[in-house]
Structure formats: C-alpha cells, structure tokens
Amino acid sequence: MLKNNNSTLINPQTGKLAFKLYYFEKENPFDHIQRLNYYSLIWVKNGNGNIKVDFSNYTFKENTLFSFSPYQPFLLNVETEISGLVINFHPDFFCIHKHHKEVACNGVLFNNIYNPPFVQVDEKAKTNFEMIIDQFKAEIQKPDLAQYELLISYLKIFLISASRLKTAQQIEARRVTEENKEPFILQNLKNYIETHYKTKHTASDYADMLSITPKALTTLTKTHFNKTLTDLISERIIIEAKRELYLTNKTVKEIAYELGYNDEYYFSRFFKKNADVSPQHYRDTVGFDRATAI
C-alpha cells in the first residue's frame, strides 16, 4: 500500500504523505507560519525560544514535545540553535478520532483548547521515545510484510506514552498550584462550552449563563488559558467541523447547520478565517474517510 522514499511513506492511492520521520539540526524549519494537512509531532531536543500557536504564545525549553492537528497554525521563534526530530502522519494513515478508545490522545495531545499543545520529555520518557523511534527507522528502511500495520502499532505506543506523560504532568501542575486553582466559574464555563458550542457562539451567551460580564469572563480566560473567550468558542467549533469533514460524508451546508449556522457561506468564511483554508479544501487535502462515512 505504501511506497518508501527514505524516511517518507506515500500513499499511492492518494499521492499524499502517509508517514514521515526526519531530523533537524541548527536551522529552524518552523520559522514561518505552518499550516500542515497532517498531524505533526515535533520533539525539540536542544534549544529554547517561544512558540505561537493559534491565538496564544508560549515559551519552551529543550526536550519539549509539540503536537499539532491538521491546519493548526504554529510558528517557532528560537533564541538558540535548535535540533530535534519530527513525526508527521496523515489522518488516512492513522485517524485519532476513529482510534480514540485505543489511544486516547484526542483531547490530550491534540484538540485540547484549554492546555498548551506540548509536554516536557523527562529522562524516562526520553529513553522510551528513543526506543520507539529506533523501531520506526528500522521498519521504514527495511520494508517487509505488514509494514503499514507495524508502523501504526509503533505510532500508537508513542502516542499513548506521550498522552500518559502529558496527563501526569497536568495533574502535577494542578497539585503544585492548588492555591491558585481555576476559579469554579471556569469549570462551569468548560461544561457550558462543551454542551452549547453548537448553538451559542458569542462571549455574551456564556457570560449571561454564568452571571458575569463578558469583559470579566474574558479576563479570567486570558489569565488561566492564555486565550480570549471568543478564541475558546471558535476553536471548539472548528475542532468539531474538522472532525465532521473527515469522518462523515455530510455536505458543508449540513455541517454548518448542525453547528448552528444557517448561512453556509458565513460558516465557510468563519472556517477559513480560523483554519486558513475553506471547508472543502480541508476535506480535499486532509481527506475524507469514505470507508466509515455514514
């Protein structure tokens, strides 16, 4: 099914990248806005700087593992020379939505609108990741029977390991900052966004439900999530739109309507503003899982 070109596997049925593993050193390959049509795991082993992701900015140091979804915009500004490795994989090669119960990385590594899209790699995780990467390299260089299935197995192990690491670090961070824990109102906000994002799209909608002014609520979200309330709502809608575009054969008009937009063209403009591509272009480049579409 897959053709081997050094560290890159191409799906001959679509001509799209299926899986790629490569290293970078000294030069920063992410010094301009990246909007990729596949998932990307970037392990910065050496170097530090700051990263712009979606609507937010974060600092990072050596041994940081970043995780980005298709068309999620990001840019790395570095203060030193950096080196590391990248794992790219297309949804047609491995779909985190379809395999959520097996891997559980969706909402942890990817598509978590409340936490930064990265995790610190400690020494134990570093050793584990290096072992998995060695297996990747060996399998890519010497393709054999069931290569596709074996690479996916290694990818699952890597994603599960990274998800466990990030979950553990988030629990520890919450414990360390117990005295500055999230206001109870933000816990309710998370629940309200998850329940109502398809029907309520404005900051004032959620402020009304929480009996607080939009300005005060946005101040809280900026302090605790490094994002405005409008950013959080928009990201949640876009995540669902992307999922629907890939996993179903619904038209853009149907998806727009289910997400609370009666005007397909207004929704398409909203999607393009946030994803930098139209809904149809997203489906054309990221793919459409016809095998499981209803």
Image (cartoon, rainbow, N blue to C red):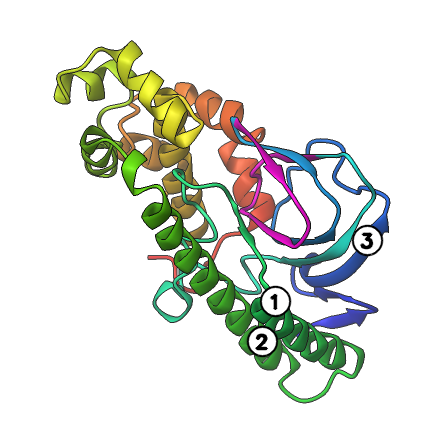
Q: Nearer the viewer, residue 231 or 89?
A: 231
Quick one: quadrant of the C terminus?
Answer: bottom left
Label 2: how many Cα within 10 Å (few below 14, some 14–19, many 20+): some
Q: Which residues are magenta?
A: 56-76
Q: Which residue is mark 3?
A: 24
Pointer 3 and pointer 1: residues touching (CB < 8 Å)? no
Above or below 140: residue 194: above
Amino acid identity at mark 2: Tyr
Query: In the figure, 188 relative to 14: above or below?
Result: above
Q: Nearer the viewer, residue 99 or 163?
A: 163
Q: Which residue is mark 1?
A: 123
Q: Position of residue 155 (x, y in %)?
A: 57, 70
Q: Secondary structure at mark 2?
A: helix
Q: Amino acid at mark 1?
A: Glu
Check disc 1 and report its element: helix, strand or loop. Answer: helix
Residue under label 2:
154
Image quarter where the N terminus lies is bottom right
Query: Are the two marked residues, 2 and 1, in contact with CB atoms closer than 8 angstroms?
Result: no
Could you tell me residue 193's position as x and y percent? 25, 33
